[in-house]
Amino acid sequence: MNASKILQQLMQQAGGSQKGSGVDVKGMLDGLSKQLGGSGSHGKSSGGNVGGFDMKSLLGGGALGMLVGSKRGRKMGGKALKYGAIAGVGVLAWKAWQNAQNKGAGSATQEADEGERVEALDGEYQERRSLELLQAMIMAARVDGHIDEQEQALITEQIDALGADDEMHRWVEQQLKAPLDAQALAREADSPQAAREMYLISVAVIDETTPMERAWLDQLASELGLSPEMAAELERQAQQAEAG
């Protein structure tokens, strides 16, 4: 399985990089925002169209756009699409921990006890963390129940386009159909840093202002053992990393 390769490419998409997939998601979102006057006020139509524009096409059809941008009812002016948090998930999660320590909101622990950032891992450790984060992203994208079979197929297709091997392809298909289980997901976290990254990347994918998704984040934070203060700090980091 090549989960680390897929996650790295999604992070590059999120950062608007021309490497890997070559899909400048952030740039496309900026263009869409301008076309729509910075809001979705031009009206919506079914099938993922906003104001007559095909959102999936404008997002380049990328896997990240499918997981995040195709969520119906999202505001498209950069307010809810926190791509920057995906691009720098490890660094931002670590910064949240440091801020909590400085504020006295976290337990007094040594850095060595916290675990490494995903960007600093390699080998099997990077592969495992990448799987954890991809699983968190997919579950978060499914919380509102909108991903139908056609969209599942499109997401799998886009993941394949990033270079997924056969094992990774099967794993993604399984995750798109597996029961949503915050407790099972939280058990995959192999360190406090992993837990923070899993929560932050979930915040980046979903719109926490909706009751269903807010409930998922609250449950996930509890299962991950995150204090309300830490969860709030992670959400603040994600908000500050918003694209646009």
Image (cartoon, rainbow, N blue to C red):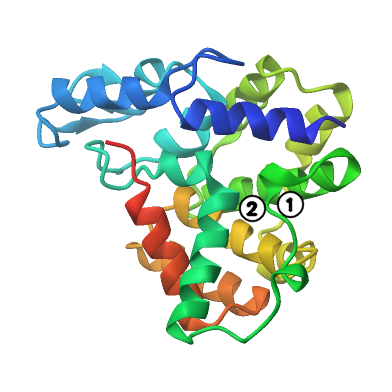
Relative image position of residue 220 (x, y in whole percent): 59, 70
- The quarter of the rendered structure image containing the C terminus is top left
Q: Is residue 120 above or below residue 159?
A: below
At a point 33% along the width and 38% down the height, the residue shown is 243
Which residue bears the numbered disc 1? 132
Circle on res. 136: 2
Residue 198 relative to residue 188: left or right: left
The image quadrant of residue 25 is top left
Residue at the (44%, 16%) spot, across then down = 60
Closer to us: 133 or 191: 191
* Quadrant where the N terminus is found in the figure: top right
* Coordinates of residue 89 in the picture (x, y in percent): 55, 49
Horizontal side, residue 14 vs residue 94: left or right: left
Q: Look at 70% across and 60% down and name the residue there.
A: 194
- The kind of residue tagged 1 is Glu
The x and y percentages for residue 207 are: 38, 54
Residue kind at label 2, given as amino acid type: Ala
The kind of secondary structure element at disc 1 is helix
Q: Is residue 139 left or right of residue 163?
A: left
